[in-house]
Image: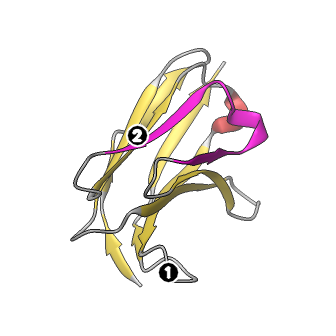
Amino acid sequence: QMQVAESGGGSVQAGGSLRLSCEFPGYNPCMGWFRQAPGKEREGVANIVSDGGTWYRGSVKGRFTISQDNTKNNLYLLMNGLKPEDTGMYFCAARQCYESSYKYWGQGIQVTVSG
């Protein structure tokens, strides 16, 4: 696995917003966001594929939006209406769509929601 850096995390009050970003080397059109809360296993949050199709975890539907730029190098996660249960370390990931596992992973960025 090759690591990349995320940006945009931080601490917000419940109901606030954050936008996470990640830049990958080269063209990797299948991308996703994952998170891990203290004492819990890592879970998928959202993913996007080359034709723009998306999947969201039920608990974030309607609040989070995943997107990628036209070059398929950059991945974003807009998080609105944040709740304390969204707190955790967030990781981005990317791969070629024919690969079975993610090749690139972010180092992780902390998101803390209080209130």
Q: Would you identify the image quadrant in which residue 13 lies?
A: top right
Q: Is residue 71 above or below residue 3?
A: above
As rendered, which of 90 and 61 lies closer to the eye? 61
Residue depicted at x 49% and y 23%: 12
Check disc 2: other Cα within 10 Å, few if <14, some if 14-19, many if 20+. Answer: some
Helix, strand or loop status at disc 1? loop
Q: Is residue 88 magenta?
A: no
Q: Would you identify the image quadrant in which residue 24 lies?
A: bottom left
Three-letter residue code for mark 2: Gly
Three-letter residue code for mark 1: Tyr
Q: Residue furthest front?
A: 51
Q: Quadrant of the N terminus?
A: bottom left
On the image, the x and y values in percent for residue 21 come to 33, 45
Helix, strand or loop status at disc 2? loop
As rendered, which of 113 and 67 lies closer to the eye? 67
- First in sequence: mark 2 or mark 1? 2
On the image, the x and y values in percent for residue 87 come to 62, 40
Check disc 1: other Cα within 10 Å, few if <14, some if 14-19, many if 20+. Answer: few
Residue indicated by mark 2: 9
Residue depicted at x 58% and y 57%: 34
Q: Is residue 54 magenta?
A: yes
Residue indicated by mark 1: 98
Which stretch did the figure color magenta? 53-68
On the image, the x and y values in percent for residue 86 come to 65, 37
As rendered, which of 35 and 60 lies closer to the eye? 60
Q: Are marks 2 and 1 in contact (CB under 8 Å)?
A: no
Residue depicted at x 25% and y 48%: 70
Left or right, residue 83 beside residue 21? right
Residue depicted at x 48% and y 22%: 17
Q: Is residue 95 above or below residue 90?
A: below
